[in-house]
Amino acid sequence: MDELAALEDPKARAVNEKHGDDHGVNLGKLRAVAKRLKTQQDLARELWATGDTAARLLALLVCRPKAFDRAELDTMLRDARTPKVHDWLVNYVVKKSTHAEELRLAWLADPDPVVASAGWALTTERVAKKPEGLDLDGLLDVIEADMKDAPDRLQWAMNHCLAQIGIDHPGHRPRALAIGERLEVLKDYPTPPNCTSPYAPTWITEIVRRRESA
């Protein structure tokens, strides 16, 4: 904890706080600490228990994802309220867990929009890598009905799923494009030069173009 405190950068904290994250540690330096520590599950649990955001990020880098049971991961997700901790927990730990599919289904139906956003993130992973058995039309039905008025983080996750369906599944692409164009979610999102807009029709069209020209 002392080492993490020494890595605190007020400028980094100011930037992170604009995105809802309450830490000021440079993530490259945090990864260097994790690389030195290597995998340490007991330490990871202790770091997580501090409740400190930087410590929790480090915990997610040094933990053993398959060592957590389903109830533990569910509790951790509900306690991970800052965006970066939430994102890393889902991407670095839950996706590698044997409980990922059970949690995907449970979280997808959760009334808490932040928890539900994790369910959508796991669903997007399946759309891209393991779509067998998914009801893509049903997902598009839900997105079409609910995305426009969803809270920010849930809306973002649903939008990512919409784009992924359009990118990876040509048979559903026209409908995905039409939903994006009608709802106009993130249409005016400020996008830096050389970055792809998160507006689904633009995102889908650009990634498909890149793949076809590769």
Image: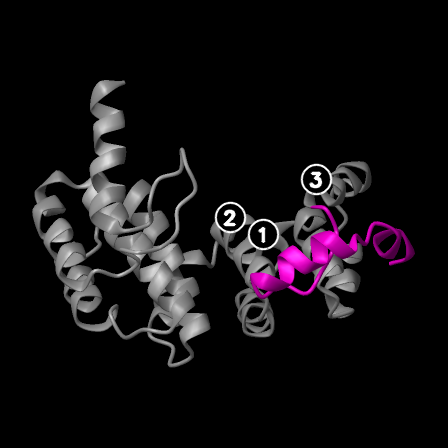
Query: Cα distance, mark 1 to mark 2?
Result: 7 Å
Mark whose residue sits in front, 1 or 2: 2
Q: Picture coordinates of residue 129 (x, y %)?
A: 32, 41
Q: Which residues are magenta?
A: 1-26
Q: Is residue 159 above or below residue 154?
A: above
Q: Is residue 159 above or below residue 201?
A: below
Q: Picture coordinates of residue 33 (x, y %)?
A: 79, 42
Mark whose residue sits in front, 2 or 3: 3
- Indicate the secondary structure of the residue bearing disc 2: helix
Which of the two residues, 152 or 73, is positioned nearer the viewer here?
Answer: 152
Q: Earlier in the sequence, mark 1 or mark 3?
A: 3
Residue 6 is a magenta residue:
yes
Q: Report the amino acid beneath label 2.
A: Lys
Q: Earlier in the sequence, mark 2 or mark 3?
A: 3
Which residue has dot 2 on it?
A: 96
Q: Residue at x 81, y 42 (%)?
A: 37
- Indicate the secondary structure of the residue bearing disc 3: helix
The answer to which image quadrant residue 76 occupies is bottom right
Question: Is residue 154 found left or right of 142 in the rendered image?
Answer: right
Which residue has dot 1 on it?
A: 66
Question: Is residue 6 found left or right of 206 in the rendered image?
Answer: right
Q: Is residue 131 at all visible to an observer of this figure? A: no
Instruction: Bin the neighbour count of mark 3 within 10 Å (Cα to Cα): few under 14, some 14-19, many 20 and up.
Output: few
Query: Cα distance, mark 1 to mark 3?
Result: 25 Å
Q: Report the amino acid beneath label 1.
A: Lys
Which residue has dot 3 on it?
A: 28
Numbered circles on residues, count: 3
Question: Is residue 117 found left or right of 21 in the rendered image?
Answer: left
Q: Earlier in the sequence, mark 1 or mark 2?
A: 1
